[in-house]
Amino acid sequence: MGDFNPVLRGLSAYFRLTNYGDRMVAGCKVPESVVSEMLDSPADNAYTWGGERWPETRLEEMLREMNITTSGLLAGVQHHLTVECHYPVIDDPYEVGKIICADAIADLYAMGITECDKMLMLACRPRRMSMSEFNVVYSMMEEGFKQCFQATGGRETWAQCMHSDWFIAGGLASSHWEKSQLLARDNAVDGDVLVLTKPLGTQMAIDAYGCIGQPQAWECYNPFVTEEDLRVAYRLAVNSMTRLNRKAASLMHLHNAHGALAVSGRGILAHARTLALLQKQPLSFNINILPVIGKLATVPCCQSRLRRGVSHEISGGLLICMPREDAASFCRLLEAQDGHPAWIIGTVQSGQRDAIVCKNARIIEVSE
């Protein structure tokens, strides 16, 4: 993961995939406006049907080529489509493919959908990346995407390339699911607790790892952690980002989940606030435990953002509201089935549809 060698793949020793992302965007997530403009743009070729040519958007073309039906469904069945796009998170295209697959399907899992029908990988080639470089990156990314997809239970995957000013890795996930089997997001009540299924600090771990070998950037880490500490944090972050939330989605049905969101693109506080706003009842979410990757929380510049709940996360866990009596069992079963822990990180109580990270929130170091 951290030892990706571009030379062994026929690339220049100086090739870095992350150099092709928009560094002005925090958290590597492509803004929704950019994604919408890209998918709503006209397709290259009009669709011919009944002897007539019909203009299509790129998204409509993708769905048609994937044979995804969005109308005429069986009674009680709904179609759900999620789209996630990121600028390069790390330099290893294989792991980038796995990350975007796990992230694209996470919103389905947050709704309690455990089966994905089809997925599409999207890769945009920036004009300054040569075709030979793109072919190598695309092939590796597709390999990682397909490997991650195998664990979703889905039947088919596609891959498609487009052009852009930046390299963009995207994923589309499609599922037809019975409405009666969906988990509502707005049923939290006073007395529930908040559960998180992956640790925090993914973006911070990646950024910190990138400072190794950079004397000026390394200064803020050197007094507090070693290079090996950051290598461990990087491995933990990549393992977390490439892991599916599928088992958590399945267990939510058995443990009376009252609502959930996939954590990605923003800090835990922003996601908690969004979930609080969705609830039928006026509630406040109080986060009092922060499970953090490795020793990142010992670094002052990292600790501040973590304690405020504003550190960006990539392909994070599910943030779930559920009864306290169910939460402990949920965490035990998830660790037994998935091999990774989950945590009760806060409480739900009557309030003002908001969320806070408590000033004295306890930090848990999550190690290998």
Image: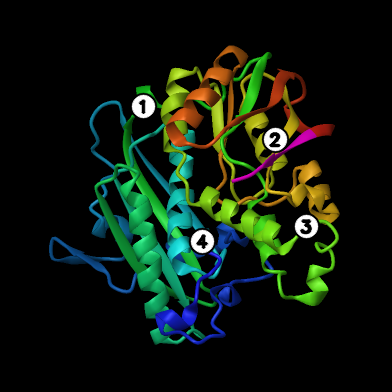
Question: Residue 293's x, y, as percent?
Answer: 66, 47
Q: Quadrant of residue 74?
A: top left
Relative vertical location of residue 9 with respect to residue 346 in this rendering, above or below: below
> Dots 3 and 2: beta carbons under 8 Å?
no
Q: Which residue is mark 3?
A: 225
User: Relative to 365, is 71 on the left or the right?
Assistant: left
Residue 179 is tagged as 1
Q: Residue at x 41, y 28 (%)?
A: 250
Q: Nearer the viewer, residue 8 or 207?
A: 8
Q: Which residue is mark 4?
A: 35
User: Which circle's residue, 4 or 1, is located before the other in the chain?
Assistant: 4
Q: Quadrant of residue 89?
A: bottom right
Q: Nearer the viewer, residue 125 or 1?
A: 1
User: Which circle's residue, 3 or 2, is located before the other in the chain?
Assistant: 3
Q: Which residue is mark 2?
A: 273
Q: Amino acid at mark 3?
A: Val
Q: Nearer the viewer, mark 3 or mark 2?
A: 3
Question: Magenta region: which residues?
Answer: 362-368
Report how many numbered discs are placed on residues in the image: 4
Q: Nearer the viewer, mark 4 or mark 3?
A: 3
Relative vertical location of residue 305 with respect to residue 341 in this rendering, above or below: below
Question: At numbered mark 3, what does the secondary structure look like: helix, strand or loop?
Answer: loop
User: Which circle's residue, 1 or 3, is located before the other in the chain?
Assistant: 1
Tell me if I can see residue 356 in this picture. yes
Question: Residue 49's x, y, as percent?
Answer: 17, 61
User: Which circle's residue, 2 or 4, is located before the other in the chain?
Assistant: 4
Question: At numbered mark 2, what does the secondary structure look like: helix, strand or loop?
Answer: helix
Q: CA distance from mark 1 to mark 3?
A: 49 Å
Q: Quadrant of residue 190?
A: top right
